[in-house]
Image (cartoon, rainbow, N blue to C red):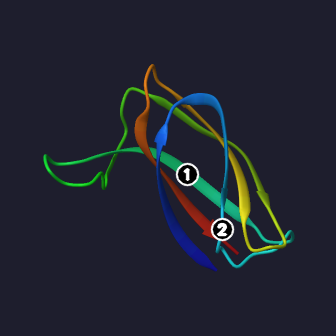
Amino acid sequence: MGLWKVDRVGNGDFIHFKVTGLGINRHSIVLASICEIGAAPGQPPDFPFVGAATLEVHNIAPQDDGSADFVVAVRWGSPINYRLNIATY
């Protein structure tokens, strides 16, 4: 079992990306949640919150190379900071 946080910036209905180094294979269970993240002035984004944007995790596909492919939607008019929280079994 492992837990990871992946912080990203973007927006769109079909955002496809790979997260490596998860130590999993095609038989693993991968769960994810998504939220916006904000920052105090002069600090990096590290404060999870529920904002006005619609964020969705659509697909997760674990791979034999220890990575997983993700498809998410971030529905907002411009790029925003968001975090994917990942749990693997």
Mark 2 crowd level (few <14, some 14–19, many ≥20, 10 Å Cα): few
Please tell me which residue is depicted at 70% across the width and 63% down the height of the picture: 30
Please tell me which residue is depicted at 46% across the width and 24% down the height of the picture: 76
Q: Secondary structure at mark 1?
A: strand
Judge whether 58 appears above or below 24 on screen.
Answer: above
Amino acid residing under circle 2: Thr
Percent position of residue 34, x then y:
52, 47
**Quadrant placement of the C terminus:** bottom right
Amino acid residing under circle 1: Ser
Image quarter of residue 1: bottom right
Furthest residue toward left: 41
Image position of 49 (left or right of 72): left
Mark identifier at residue 46: none
Report which residue position mark 2 lands on: 20
Image position of 80 (left or right of 29): left
Q: Tell which tag, 2 or 1, sits nearer the viewer.
A: 2
Image position of 67 (left or right of 5): right
Q: Nearer the viewer, residue 23 or 27?
A: 23
Q: Earlier in the sequence, mark 2 or mark 1?
A: 2
What is the C-alpha distance between the residues marked 2 and 1? 17 Å
Mark 1 crowd level (few <14, some 14–19, many ≥20, 10 Å Cα): few
Judge whether 20 appears above or below 39 on screen.
Answer: below
Report which residue position mark 1 lands on: 33
Q: Secondary structure at mark 2?
A: loop
Furthest residue toward top: 77
